Amino acid sequence: MKRSFLFALPILASLLLGFYLGHVWAQRRFNEGARILSQFLALKEYEVLADLQYKESTAIEGKQSLLGLLAFMDKIEKERGVAPFMQQGLYLDRGNAYVRLAFLEENEGNKARSEEYIRQAQVVLRKTNMNDTSEGHLREVVTKLDATTHYMLPYVLTFAKSVK
């Protein structure tokens, strides 16, 4: 009896320790996943709203929504930090917003402000793996994105391509 108890005790201790460590690790991973998912969903919903306002409302309201989106992105980065694999998508979405702001400013006759937004888009998009950040290419990409009848985040497009 004593021999079997001495044999079973380390096994039981190992099982309990393994259960505890597994539980702690799983809880941390779950919390991290929940944080990332909430960030992604909040950003997605805000971008859909900004997209609708940009496409369907006045230029002033579109500009306000895009500036609000950029402020929201800054807030997420500063307050909570962004998961490393989401950072590239955030850069793409931010670059898209800057180019759209450039379009709105250009339509209002504010050429200097339009050029500044294009420069900001180029700076942000150079942080991604985008090879061509020329003004013409950015205008072409965002014009194609704006021509779609449905909205899909540029980040989702990037993610979908990487999965295939």
Image (cartoon, helix red, strand yellow):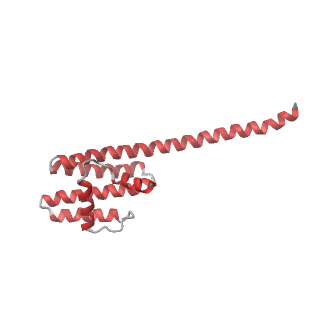
Q: Where residue 144 sits in the image (x, y, percent)? A: 25, 58
Residue visible at 41% across and 48% down in the picture = 80
Q: Where residue 160 sits in the image (x, y, percent)? A: 40, 53
Comparing 29 with 78, the one in front is 29
> Height in image: 30 above or below 95?
above
Q: Quadrant of the C terminus?
A: bottom left
Q: Where residue 37 sits in the image (x, y, percent)? A: 43, 44
Horizontal arrangement in the rendering, residue 1 relative to residue 113 (left or right): right
Q: In which image quadrant can residue 16 be found?
A: top right
Residue visible at 34% across and 57% down in the picture = 92
Residue visible at 32% across and 68% down in the picture = 132
Give the farthest residue toward the left: 109
> Height in image: 31 above or below 139?
above
> Height in image: 80 above or below 123?
above
Give the farthest residue toward the front: 164
Residue visible at 39% across and 45% down in the picture = 39
Q: Where residue 163 sits in the image (x, y, percent)? A: 45, 54
Q: Quadrant of the N terminus?
A: top right
Q: In which image quadrant can residue 38 be found?
A: top left
Comparing 3 with 81, the one in front is 3
Query: How many numbered markers are drawn?
Result: 0
